[in-house]
Amino acid sequence: MMREVITEAEAALLHTYNRYPIVFDRGEGVRLYDIEGKRYLDFASGIGVFALGYHYGDFDDALKAQIDKLLHTSNYYYNVPAVEAAKKIKRISGMDRVFFTNSGAEAVEGAIKAARKYAYLKDGRTDHEIIAMQHSFHGRTMGALSVTGTPKYREAFAPMIGHIRFAKLNDMESVMAQISDKTCAILLETIQGEGGIHPAQEPFLRELRRLCDERDILLILDEIQCGMGRTGYYYAWQRFGIRPDIMTTAKALGGGVPVGAFLMTEAVGAHSLEAGDHGTTYGGNPFAAAAVSRMIDLLEENQILEHVREMGAYLEEKLDALTARCDFVRERRGCGLMQGLQCRDTVGAVIGRALEAGLILINAGPSVIRLLPPLIIEREHVDEMIGILEACLKEDVR
Ligand SMILES: *Cc1c(COP(=O)(O)O)cnc(C)c1O
């Protein structure tokens, strides 16, 4: 059954992915089922999208109710769900102004435009530079790709948008080496996801914040993967007592419904994008906004952050013990329920075997096993995952 679907898919879809040979059918809680009925424990949650797992609480009902009312209006008019969603996302983020997008990459595009416009309004120049980080990932559109620090993603699509410089994460000297009077923004993921689960460290973020304040450079934090509760904070930067000038969010924001946003402080909002500068047909439509709104309610009502802190600590403990037992695993990195196991070799075979054994894992680069479970996992799920993963790792060493 799966074979047929896969053959048809490969005949019809553009081959831009090497997919695992699984056709998923439905989800329930932290489990997915393929179309042949096999059950999987999900430790990837659709790349960190299904933060509350599948069919959580009354989330689906909120979506269904909105479908029955209105899906789309365009941004020529106001709609209530978008206002509600904007107020809630402001509340959990402490940012002041919201622009809704349809994806993460689009949020990054908006953030770049806002930063350039802010700098342009200050000095009228059009040669401003942005400093991004090596090994970063910000999306596949041309602007987002231009600030993505993995050369292999960019190479064939040159020329990129200009005036981007790359520095080393957690290395202030390398940032200073790229700074000039043209620098308008410094952009980074608070925790690098695709690049291999590399957290920005507190002293580095604090130094960046100080530097940006001193020179009126905008600090842009990409929270698309690490945000929405994944680290035990709504946004990962909140544990460091700093605030970015611009922030991007997506993935878990709509709990499975495609939606993103970029947010900014009032200071940036009042001096950057103006009417006519930016737009989107679908962004902030009532359906996506209803999803965001209910997602945030459910995170709050069910004290998900507290749960993530508890489960994150448990997961870390178990992963650290596994790392100590397993020669193939070199180190654990990450925070809360965003974890990576740096291995000594490529992890494709381990992930393939885990899938066969009914455990969904993904990688982050060739040699890192990435864990992004739904935020609602319990200890028993962590134990189950560790058991399967350890068996799969042992086969690899042999
Ligand atoms: C996934 C991701 C993006 C891109 O989001 P899309 O919705 O795929 O466009 C950007 N930044 C980070 C940190 C991401 O993890």
Image (cartoon, rainbow, N blue to C red):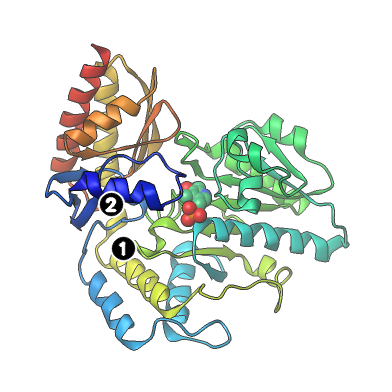
Q: Position of residue 252 (x, y in %)?
A: 38, 57
Q: Which residue is mark 1?
A: 299
**Label 1: which secondary element:** helix
Q: Which residue is mark 2?
A: 375
Residue visible at 40% across and 39% down? 18
User: Which is nearer the N-term, disc 1 or disc 2?
Assistant: 1
Residue visible at 40% across and 36% down? 334
Residue 231 in sight from this viewpoint: no
The image shows a total of numbered marks equal to 2
Query: In the figure, is residue 282 to the left or right of 364?
Result: right
Task: Kindly report the distance in space between the C-alpha atoms of the residues bearing marks 1 and 2.
Answer: 9 Å
Residue type at tag 2: Leu
Residue visible at 21% across and 72% down? 58
Query: In the figure, is residue 208 to the left or right of 360?
Result: right
Corner quadrant of residue 385: top left
Query: In the figure, is residue 76 to the left or right of 291?
Result: right
Corner quadrant of residue 172: top right
Q: Where is 288 relative to 367, above or below?
A: below
Residue visible at 71% across and 49% down? 212
119 or 260, nearer to the observer: 260
